[in-house]
Amino acid sequence: MRNLINTVAASAMLLGVASAAHAAENVEVLHWWTSGGEATALEVLKKDLESKGISWSDMPVSGGGGTEAMTVLRARVTGGNAPTAVQMLGFDIFDWAKQGSLGNLDEVAAKEKWDDVIPTALQQFSKYDGHWIAAPVNVHSTNWIWINKAALDKAGGKEPQNWDELIALLDKFKEQGITPVAHGGQPWQDATIFDAVVLSLGNDFYKSAFIDLDPATLGGEKMKEAFDRMTKLRTYVDDNFSGRDWNLASAMVIENKAGLQFMGDWAKGEFVKAKKEPGKDFVCMRFPGTQGSVTFNSDQFAMFKVSDDKTKAQLVMASAIENPEFQSAFNVVKGSAPARTDVPDTAFDACGKKAIKDLAEANKAGTLYGSMAHGHANPAAVKNAIYDVVTRQFNGELSSEDAVKELVAAVDAAK
Ligand code: GAL
């Protein structure tokens, strides 16, 4: 009896110790990966961390593109209760680093030689003042279209190579009685199309407009043409597009209700989740006129300054994210390319292989640009100013002429 009591007490003690250790190694992760495909990808990360003894407290904030998540984050940090790790894009990472809110990942980055394998385009956002402050998990890009293969075949099977061919294809989808463009009317989704439309009018034009914020380009004839193209595309969406979430728009293409969607390659996560195959059920291609160029965004996990007992879990998480096997497993499901240059493309489907290849080629050719719509071209204030004009114009509240004028003024005020 006595032995039994001792054994029970001893195991209780052991359990106590174990759970204390477990509790200490926990990450609370704020993110906006709430769609089917996104949640499946997140599960890969969660399971990976659990296998390393790190428990996961989930803090999802739905809303594609992360606008709502960033609002919740600000409230949490202002309240003195920062999450351990936060999904973040481009310039938002800088904003928090500037305020001195982020921790330091130099130790793990040096040990694992991140400098050698993470592309410079991503390092620009993962480092501040020479120190690693975030761990990039992927590279997405926004200048993609996702076409229903059966509808494309019915329309003659030819992938549109330029603007006129795109419009001809959309007209054919209309004749087929399906919604030509599956779209969700939310500012970040309108802006995602605008990324591609602006890029389709030239690499230099995109760079001058969104990276350099040149007033003459923002207010010029070509920008007016970009807005005219948006007006044209608007004629191909259905009546219920307003406010629709992006993954529901993807579902319209998946379920043969729509011809195509203009969206970043996180859309592929939805197709994969629905067991659809590239080349058979859907076609992925670059927005016509943007072949050879890539507008990228990279999801990174920024680590906030937390009490000492929590930093170990942050470093384990950062290391797990950069592990090459994890990079492959995660990005195959997410629809993105790996955040390291040394991850083989073997496990990726045709669209994933194309994403990896396009990225490497654009990087080499100097045609890799940060996505305006996804926070890789400008700080949030400028991005939001552009969103506002793009959305109002797309919804017919502004003519193209007025939109270019407003764009110049709004960007100037936000700079
Ligand atoms: C992007 C993000 C992607 C995806 C998408 C839709 O900003 O980089 O990972 O989540 O939003 O929510």
Image (tube, rainbow, N blue to C red):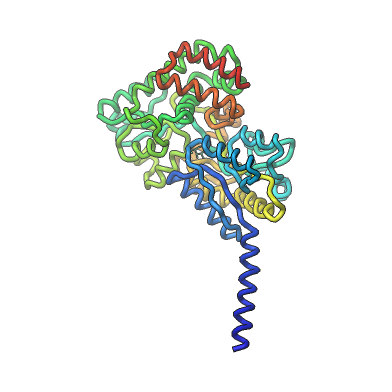
Residue nearest the observer in this picture, 107 or 33: 33
x%, y% of residue 19?
A: 61, 65
Indicate left or right for 354 with 54 as reference. Answer: left
Residue nearest the observer in this picture, 150 or 410: 410
Is residue 358 among the parts visible in the rendering?
Answer: yes
Residue nearest the observer in this picture, 87 or 271: 87
- Residue 126: image quadrant is top right
Q: Quadrant of the C terminus?
A: top right
Q: Quadrant of the N terminus?
A: bottom right
Q: Is residue 259 above or below residue 271?
A: above
For the view shown, which residue lies furthest in the front direction? 79
- Residue 56: image quadrant is bottom right
Residue at image point 47% right, 48% down: 39
Q: How many marks?
A: 0
x%, y% of residue 68?
A: 52, 37
x%, y% of residue 333?
A: 47, 47
Residue at image point 61% right, 56% down: 26
Q: Is residue 324 above or below residue 382?
A: below
Q: Is residue 396 above or below residue 21?
A: above
Residue nearest the observer in this picture, 411 or 370: 411
- Residue 250: image quadrant is top left
Is residue 120 among the parts visible in the rendering?
Answer: no
x%, y% of residue 76?
A: 60, 43
